Image (tube, rainbow, N blue to C red):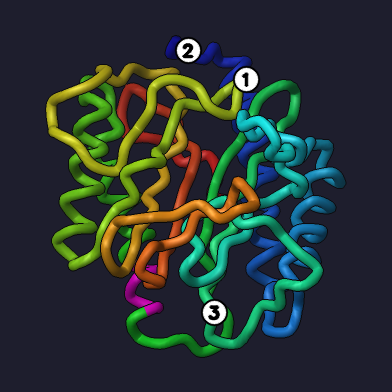
């Protein structure tokens, strides 16, 4: 069921989303070669807790028998890892890596969700361009995140732009509604037909998240039950914000 948020609920959403934005500000300042993904995760966790939020990804159920719930406060995915990478004391961030971080903060019972792909040190021109295109794909999508448009208009805009740049979008995972639950209706694929799907209304809060692959769109899941990688070993990037549909332009809630 799609929820239309009241003014009070929007205020709660804004508070949670601001904490997510503060978390990414801190991570951008602290990320460097030589640190572990576990260290980066602890920095994010501290920002959320210090600001009165709960790291909502920690303990998130896998939904698969035998696969443990997610053990960390952030998903950290490096290079050919697309999403859901598990932070580890043994995973060292290196010069030239691109590091995607996805995190959700909950406060007052409402969630804020965003993802960023950080460039660590000097990276290849190809990696730099992938990160830039992935971010721009989000902004191409939200040109249609307005009253009266449909979910398919956002999806189509993202997919068309990504493919025009010579890249692929992940088809098995998608953006989503967000509020009291981390994942709510509607689902928002990064490809699709314009003019299809749910019509957008003011008060809807959506997490729009292009996941872009440098090579072919095929993906694999690692044995940990969480980490998704590119099948061909090519680089992947991720960019996400929580937005609010208004009477006019969409409001991005997870940017300071």
Q: Compared to 38, does 176 lie above or below?
A: above
SS at mark 1?
loop
Dot in front, 3 or 1: 3
Q: CA gap, disc 3 to disc 1? A: 34 Å
Residue at image point 21% right, 25% down: 149
Residue 111 seen:
yes
Q: Earlier in the sequence, mark 1 or mark 2?
A: 2
Q: Compared to 100, does 67 lie above or below?
A: above
Instruction: Estimate how packed mark 2 is, as few (under 14), some (14 to 19) or many (20 or more) residues with alpha carbons within 10 Å.
Output: some
Residue at image point 57% right, 62% down: 77
Bounds of the magenta span? Answer: 127-132
Q: Which mark is residue 180?
A: 1
Q: Quadrant of the N terminus?
A: top left
Residue at image point 18% right, 58% down: 163
Which is the main secondary structure of the residues drawn in magenta? helix
Q: Compared to 110, does 127 lie above or below?
A: below
Instruction: Estimate how packed mark 3 is, as few (under 14), some (14 to 19) or many (20 or more) residues with alpha carbons within 10 Å.
Output: many
Q: Is residue 131 magenta?
A: yes
Residue contact at pointers 1 and 2, CB within 8 angstroms? yes
Which residue is the site of mark 2? 3
Which residue is the site of mark 3? 97
């Amino acid at each position: 069921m799609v929820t239309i948020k009241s003014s009070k609920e929007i205020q709660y959403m804004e508070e949670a989303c601001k904490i997510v934005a503060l978390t990414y500000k801190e991570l951008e300042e602290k990320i460097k070669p030589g640190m572990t993904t576990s260290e980066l995760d602890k920095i994010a966790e501290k920002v959320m807790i210090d600001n009165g939020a709960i790291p909502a990804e920690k303990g998130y159920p896998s939904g698969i028998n035998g696969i443990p719930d997610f053990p960390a406060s952030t998903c950290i995915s490096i290079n050919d890892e697309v999403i859901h990478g598990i932070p580890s004391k043994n995973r060292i961030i290196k010069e030239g890596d691109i590091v995607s971080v996805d995190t959700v903060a909950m406060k007052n019972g409402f969630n804020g969700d965003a993802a960023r792909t950080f460039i660590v040190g000097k990276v290849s021109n190809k990696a730099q361009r992938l990160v830039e295109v992935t971010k721009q794909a989000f902004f191409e999508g939200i040109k249609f995140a307005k009253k009266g448009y449909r979910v398919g208009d956002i999806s189509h805009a993202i997919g068309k732009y990504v493919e025009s740049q010579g890249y692929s979008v992940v088809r098995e995972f998608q953006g989503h509604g967000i509020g009291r639950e981390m994942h709510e209706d509607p689902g928002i694929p990064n490809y699709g037909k314009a003019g299809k799907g749910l019509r957008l209304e003011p008060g809807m809060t959506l997490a729009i998240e292009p996941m872009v692959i440098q090579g072919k769109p095929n993906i694999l899941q690692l044995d940990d039950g969480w980490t998704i990688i590119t099948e061909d070993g090519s680089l992947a990037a991720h960019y996400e914000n929580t937005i609010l549909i208004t009477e006019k332009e969409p409001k991005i809630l997870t940017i300071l």
